[in-house]
Image: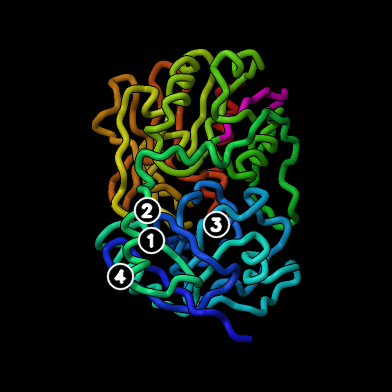
Amino acid sequence: MTHPIAKLALEDGTVYTGRGFGASGETFGEVVFNTSMTGYQEVLTDPSYKGQIVTMTYPLIGNYGINSEDRESKIPQVEGFLVRECTRIPSNFRSHQSLDSYLAEFRIIGMDGLDTRSLVRRLRVRGAMMGVLSTSELDDAALIKKARSCPSIVGRDLAKGVMPEKAFAWKDGFNSPFITQELHKSKRPHRVVALDFGMKWNILRCLVEIGCEVTVMPGTASAKDILAQEPDGVFISNGPGDPEPLTYAIGNIKQLIGKKPIFGICLGHQLLGLALGAKTFKLKFGHRGANQPVLNQKTGQVEITTQNHGFAVDPSTLPVDVESTHINLNDNTLEGMRHKRFPVFSVQYHPEASAGPHDSTYLFEEFRKLMD
């Protein structure tokens, strides 16, 4: 079987050539990289990757295929997918589809055969860049021009494109026999409103596992509508892109602080920071992978964490009644914070993992204890 030629052009004028797989056509997005060795299906379906072309640093991707259990949303969310070598013939008893056919089904363009080490090094040195991935336009100059005219991810509200249109109840806990996380249910059920800005499903599963009755509401829901649900706690989810344009969410979160226990993850952490009066900034190339070391400043323990974000809260701008709780050991960026007076806390990383280590699942039980 022959595969079409594909090209990736970056806004700095660099062009990479490889083989196309998945769908044909053209797409654009912010080109980023993920350092996980496994978990590509969870990466593909994580709504936080909306607006991004994702490069996997591990060289062989697709070897265990695609299954129906390891999804974090209904469909793949990435704009494009770049790998060193895509396995066309997967081998796993859980697999029901190849990566190639999966991306083709959902019209996602993939490319392999390129030097992903060179690409990742360029992104680390120069920072994440906008890029165009194409199997239809193969003229370098034309692709570079398109890459330079792509709208930046900064200042765009990408969350509205992946959040649900209306509220719904979520009832599923862990449904795979391969789940090894251990979470403990509370003695009485807690009603939780989960604000969805592009939420991974495993977050909802973890909330159910600690004994929560979960109502998912779109991130545009007003504080009045959230409080009308009479929740015992409010969860603020992950999601894609820049938190600053989400002024509606920041305003609503301000009205919730001090009224209910609040737990935020990733974009939810950034939105909470902005609502508390702190500022956010864009990281040079972001944190994306399942091996990021984080220091718990309270216990002194190091947690290996799953991460996916390109923005961070500036710790120097935290108000006096908010304290840092977790720090990234690679670059000292803020990874967690809590309010000194109100039952409010958040982390920048993903304690629900999926895929990744389970060092930080205790945070869901901390949320449960706040509601207890």
Q: Is residue 352 left or right of residue 119?
A: right
**Which residue was labeled with disc 3?**
43
Q: Amino acid at mark 1?
A: Gly
Question: For residue 191, which quarter of the picture?
Answer: top right
Q: Is residue 204 left or right of residue 47?
A: right
Q: Is residue 157 left or right of residue 313?
A: right
Q: CA distance from mark 1 to mark 4?
A: 9 Å
Q: Element at badge 2?
A: loop
Q: CA distance from mark 3 to mark 4?
A: 25 Å
Q: Residues within 10 Å of mark 4 (few under 14, many from 20)?
A: some
Q: Amino acid at mark 4?
A: Thr
**Which residue was labeled with disc 2?**
150
Q: Element at badge 3?
A: helix
Label 4 near label 3: C-beta < 8 Å? Answer: no
Label 1 near label 2: C-beta < 8 Å? Answer: yes
Q: Residues within 10 Å of mark 1 (few under 14, many from 20)?
A: many
**Which residue was labeled with disc 4?**
14
Q: Is residue 187 left or right of residue 254?
A: right
Q: Amino acid at mark 2?
A: Cys
